[in-house]
Amino acid sequence: MGALHNAFEDLLDEHDLARITKRSVASVRRDRLLEKGCPYVKIGSSVRYRRSDLESWLESLPSR
């Protein structure tokens, strides 16, 4: 149960993602719709983001 509990603790919702990336929730939703944002997981009707996917996605973005 411990590993499963940790996996659920690592899931972020779209509000968490918006706060962490300093973007609006609407921007997060638009990126998801256009399939160009952070990878996500659907659990029923809920959208969640794995912390590890967020870190990988951020690292893949171009930097100046």
Image (cartoon, rainbow, N blue to C red):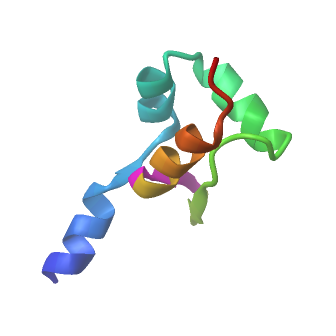
Number of labels in the image equals 0
Name the spot of residue 13 as percent of width and height, x first: 46, 42
Give the left or right position of residue 52, taking residue 43 as reference. Answer: left
* The C terminus - image quarter: top right
> Residue reaching furthest bottom?
1
Q: Whole-percent x and y of residue 17?
A: 48, 33
State the image quarter where residue 27 is shown: top right
Q: Residue at x 46, y 46 (%)?
A: 55
Q: Foreground: 48 or 36?
A: 36
Quarter of the view holding residue 2: bottom left
| Front-lying residue, 37 or 5 | 37
Q: Is residue 47 magenta?
A: yes
Q: Is residue 8 left or right of residue 54?
A: left
The magenta stretch spans residue 41: no
> From what the image shows, is residue 57 above or below residue 44?
above
The picture places residue 23, in percent across and down from the top left corner, at: 57, 17
Residue interval drawn in magenta: 46-51
- Of 42 and 59, the residue lying toward us: 59
| Residue drawn where x is 81% and y is 47% of the image | 35
User: Does residue 64 appear to the left or right of 53 in the view shown?
Assistant: right
Query: x, y percentage for residue 57?
Result: 59, 45
- Does residue 27 appear left or right of residue 59 in this picture? right
Query: Which residue occupies the extreme front position in the image?
Result: 64
What residue is at 68 percent from the left and 30 percent from the top? 62
Task: Look at the image and tell me in which quarter the N terminus lies.
Answer: bottom left
Q: Residue furthest left?
A: 2
Secondary structure mainly formed by the magenta segment: strand
